[in-house]
Image (spheres, rainbow, N blue to C red):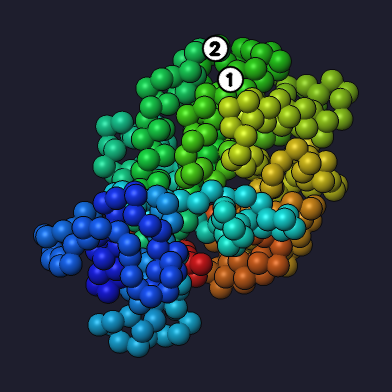
Amino acid sequence: MRLALLFAFFTSSFAWSQESTDWPQFRGPTSNGVSPAKGLPTTWTERENIAWKIETPGSGTSSPIMLGSKIYLTCYSGYNVPGRGRGNMDELKLHLVCLNRADGKLMMPRIRVNEKKTGFVLMPGDTPFVPWGFNYDHDAKGRLIEDYWEAEWPKVETDFRTMKKLGANVVRVHLQLAKFMDSADKPNAKNLDRLTTLLQLAEDVGIYLDLTGLGCYHKADVPAWYDELTEEKRWEVQARFWSSIANRCKASPAVFCYDLMNEPVVPGGPRKNGDWLGGAFGGKHFVQFISLDSQKRPRPDVARKWIQQLSAAIRKEDKDHLITVGLVDWSLDRPGLTSGFVPEKIADDLDFLCVHLYPEKGKVNDALETLKRFQVGKPVVIEETFPLKCSMEEFSEFVEGSKKHASGVIGFYWGESLDELRKSKEFRDAIVLGWLDYFTKHAR
């Protein structure tokens, strides 16, 4: 990695003056290795004539490129790294790094859907982007991020840097409505400020955020005033939630997407007043109803109207970042249990679709067939998955097979390091360790 650092040191000696000519290619603008800039340092050491230093993802031998306020570096890792032996060619990874010319901080390109609507690309240009990351939904103690991000911020920083080292380029965080809305019309300024700090951390680390909102995972935290609202008023509060979130996030390149809600459902029949949550799993309510009574309205129509209202609130603040919704795998229009969020009937109102899919033992092909049916003309991301119901071998088969249909995969990370997991004798930790080993080896 030392060679890559030397390039960073070298480019830093050009970073002092925005008036300097761009260096757009190997050997400069005229290909003769000569810069017209004046007063350039001719020597530098670890302490002399160094504006800043950064650690790159790998080694490199290419020329830095400087355009305006940005510096571009290429480097590689995993194979033939100086000082580490030749290694395995299959582990070779190529990296393109964009840095702020003034201070060396990582600059993140924004993400958009590609022209064919089959996947994602980085802007500007059309470099493919494949989401490969983690749900950071709770820690090993079951605490949600808002429960500890104020008092234990260093833990959040450590976890994000660990997830990056494991190979993640996306982290999904789950924002709880009660933490961001003090009342029906008053957002919580303190937690919005903390979200801004999280965005800065993501930019510093180089990880994109899947911001999933409106969570009511801990029933005890849900305020009574929220549960007592009518459908119309509840939707209005949800729109205000997203308006405040988008207002804070619109300028950040670290936002991959806004996920309107985790596993929303339109009920198939009337529900009791205030009964907005599905059953608990592990003490958390992940499924949430957007209505208590469809009142003879077609369920997909209710889903579309809800998506449109919340998306409009986001678009008033943020015209660019992608919008999606995290669907249960039983959202397909087929006999049996359904959510009302039928993919082909809601896709036009979203930038891409997300599905939560956990393959079962002996049913990998069934899971892949379900995934295939979510392909309705927009990219599909497997936003939740884990070897919860199958072996690692079957899970690996599922992930490999999913590449034909999905544009990315997001699993789970609960804040436990690989060393901690290796020392544990718990069966659960062995499963998590197997998953993280797989994730790291297959980081894209």
Residue 339 position, x and y percent, is: 75, 38
Q: Is residue 253 left or right of residue 8?
A: right
Q: Residue furthest bottom?
A: 86
- The residue nearer to you, when weighing 312 against 360, is 312
Q: Look at 26% across and 65% down and name the residue there.
A: 10
Going by the numbered disc 2, the residue's amino acid type is Asp
Secondary structure type for disc 2: loop
Q: Quadrant of residue 28?
A: bottom left
Q: Residue at x 34, y 49 (%)?
A: 18
Q: Quadrant of residue 42?
A: bottom left
The residue that appears at 42% across and 36% down in the rendered structure is 144
Q: Amino acid at mark 1?
A: Arg
- What's the residue at 62%, 34% (across, down)? 319
In the image, is residue 17 above or below residue 349?
below
Answer whether residue 383 is visible to the viewer in this image. Answer: yes
- Residue 83: image x %, image y %? 25, 82
What label does residue 240 carry, if any?
A: 1
Of the numbered discs 1 and 2, the one sitting upstream in the chain is: 2
> In the image shown, does 166 or 193 lie closer to the viewer?
193
State the mark number for residue 185.
Answer: 2
Q: Are marks 1 and 2 in contact (CB under 8 Å)?
A: yes
Q: Secondary structure at mark 1?
A: helix
